[in-house]
Amino acid sequence: MAAEAMVLNVAAVQMVSENGNVEGNLKHATAFVEEAAEKGASLVVLPEFMPNGYIYDSGMMWDTAEREGGPTSTWMKETSSRLGIWLGAGFLEAEGEDFFLSFLVTAPDGGEAGRVRKQTPAFAEAFFIRGEPGPHIIQTDLGKIGVGICYENHLSYMPRLMYSQGVD
């Protein structure tokens, strides 16, 4: 039996982030996310490095990388719950002494649906960020969300991975 089709309104936010200004960037993103939700988006996706800014400087990375339960995941959970939407964003995460580029999806109930870490850092990223292989899939009530982070989408393993895992 074929699965029933579902209509899903998705908003992709493109915004400027100020390097190193996590609090200001989250505040800036809030207006875009609220507007997307008001216009009917059920899933809102924000850019890579949205809260941190996109700069490779070891000092900024130490200052803005977030441990579990940091400002970005807290803001995402609260915003998802308040607006009743799914929310996805990429941010700089720290675990132990390693940095990762992680993509988190939060659910309308304010919970964490899942996270994916970039597997293949590109160019200058490789000097700062550790790659971590993984399924690149987040299972949600919307279905299986496939996550390719930036450069990974240019690599041959990504479409094979998405296809083999039955991404919706």
Image (tube, helix red, strand yellow):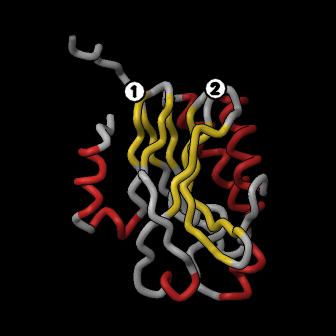
Residue on which disc 2 sits: 84
Mark 1, residues whose alpha carbon is within 10 Å: few (<14), some, or many (≥20)?
few
Report the quarter where the N terminus lies. Answer: top left
Q: How many marks?
A: 2
Mark 1 vs mark 2: which is more N-terminal?
A: 1
Residue on which disc 1 sits: 8
For badge 2, the amino acid type reads Gly
Mark 2, residues whose alpha carbon is within 10 Å: few (<14), some, or many (≥20)?
some
Q: Is residue 160 left or right of residue 41?
A: left
Q: Quadrant of residue 90?
A: bottom right
The x and y percentages for residue 111 are 68, 34
For badge 1, the amino acid type reads Leu
Q: Is residue 104 left or right of residue 140?
A: right
Question: Is 58 placed above or below 145 here?
Answer: below
The x and y percentages for residue 124 are 47, 87
**Going by the picture, which residue comes out furthest to the top?**
1
Depth check, front residue: 127 or 56? 127
Report the quarter where the C terminus lies. Answer: top left
Q: Quadrant of residue 120?
A: bottom left
- Separation of disc 1 and disc 2 at Cα? 14 Å
Question: Is 41 placed above or below 134 here?
Answer: above
Question: Is 163 placed above or below 96 here?
Answer: above
| Mark 1, secondary structure of its residue | loop
Q: Identify the residue at image location x=40%, y=35%.
A: 144
Q: Identify the residue at image location x=77%, y=61%.
A: 23
Q: Identify the residue at image location x=59%, y=38%.
A: 113
The x and y percentages for residue 82 are 72, 29
Q: Quadrant of residue 154?
A: bottom left
The x and y percentages for residue 52 are 66, 69
